[in-house]
Image: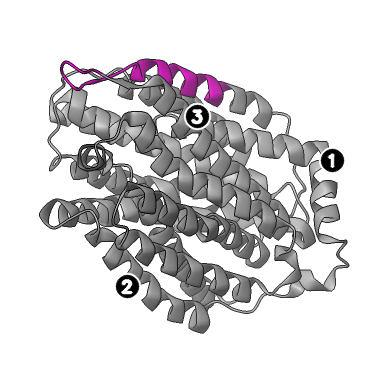
Amino acid sequence: MENKNERLILLTLAALQFTNIVDFMIIMPLGDSLMKLFKIAPHQFSIIVSAYAVSAAIFSFIAASIIDRFDRKKSLLTVYIGFTIGTFLCAFAPNYEMLIAARAFTGAFGGSMGALIFSIIADLIPVERRSSALGVVMASFSLASIAGVPLGLIIANKFSWHTPFIFLGITSALLLFAIVKVVPNITSHLSKKLVSPFRGIYNLLKDRNLLLGLIFMLLLILGQFTIIPFIAPYLVRNVGFTPNQVPLMYLVGGAVTMISSPLVGKLADKKGRRFVFYIFALFSLIPLFITTNLQVTPIYVVLTVTGFFFISITGRMIPASTLITSLVKPENRGSFMSLNSAVQQIGAGLGSWIAGSIVIESIADHKLHNFNYVGYIAMGFTILAIIIASRLKLIEGK
């Protein structure tokens, strides 16, 4: 594939991932507003976050049984249509219960989208350049933090929490045309003989190395999503941020990771994905600890800490994602990446539920307590992920 076409495909996939990430992330910094608006407790707010993740996990598992039987482009287009509809449903949800239902519907499609994007990258781009390609696409997380989430919060603060989803739905509808025009048909994996759908999943899960890979990703996601849903509410309730200052955290975090993500990808290609993962996973323990133990602190200090948090989290996910794509043969990659997506969503939902079960709101001052314990749990999951990573066996050149 020519470099020009490759870059255009990567930019298109990054744009799709951008909308996916903004849709998933925007609900979390709205946590304080939604808890007040709907008069709900922290554990009830965690259900809103978990609804997307649990639904995504279930439907990613279902997709794993059939996804390698179709052209990747057609699958991506179908999933993105469902995601767009779900985003509009979130935009017009009138109450707490309907918002949970809309988040679950969106998650049914959004969870599979990431798996398809990673499968397309792995199918089109050789392993020696794959970390760099993933770095480009995962920079969409940075752009979501720089532009998507802050802009969404500003719009939400000025109008209502519904408005960001309306804009996101319109953007997603326009990107459907980009899929049709830019993403090529990918059918090379169809030449392989496929077993019955659920037999294929069974064969993947009985492979000890692939099972370790899924456990590795589960632990890694738990090591961050136990704290991510409550960072924004914690900054507002405990650290002294105003709701209008929360977008600054995403702006700074996105700006620094916009620079760091491509560099991490290139470093992983040059120095080895496993080695770079170890470096960033160990480094992430520091901001995990500090972020969850912050008290009333000057804003510049908080932004520095959370900036390093963003760098470390994205820095460990880029080589980790490359490791995962290198565990499986191309003909099974779509199914395995869908299973991986299901596991990630289970981790996000479970992590949010764990945090919601531990964090409590003080009746007296409305501050959130026990967030430091959540941080210690996240650090423990991260250490276990590092141990598992050392035992993964990679398929060279895949």
State the image coordinates of residue 41 (x, y, percent, origin top left).
Answer: 31, 30
Residue 42 at x, y = what percent?
A: 33, 30
- Dot 3: element: helix
Label 3 packing within 10 angstroms: few (<14), some (14-19), many (20+): many
Visible in this render: residue 149? yes
Q: Quadrant of the N terminus?
A: bottom right
Q: Residue furthest bottom?
A: 181
- Which residue is at a point 60% across and 79% down the rendered structure image? 184
- Residue bearing mark 1: 206
Instruction: State left or right for residue 394 relative to residue 31.
Output: right
In the image, is 264 to the left or to the right of 231? right
x and y, in percent, of residue 47 in the image? 42, 39
Q: Does residue 9 appear left or right of residue 32 in this picture? A: right
Three-letter code, disc 3: Gly
Corner quadrant of residue 304: top left
Question: Could you tell me the amino acid type at mark 2?
Answer: Ile
Q: Nearer the viewer, residue 111 or 360?
A: 360
Examine the rendered structure and indicate whether residue 130 appears above or below residue 57. Answer: below
In the depicted structure, whether residue 389 falls above or below residue 253: above
Q: Amino acid at mark 1?
A: Lys
What residue is at 75 percent from the left and 73 percent from the top? 188
Look at the image and tell me in which quarter the C terminus lies: bottom right
Q: For the magenta stretch, what is the residue range? A: 362-383
Left or right relative to 146: residue 176: right
Residue assigned mark 2? 170
Q: Which residue is mark 3?
A: 223
Q: Mark 1: few, some, or many residues within 10 Å (few <14, many ≥20)?
A: few
Q: Give the answer, above or below, for where 268 lies relative to 156.
A: above
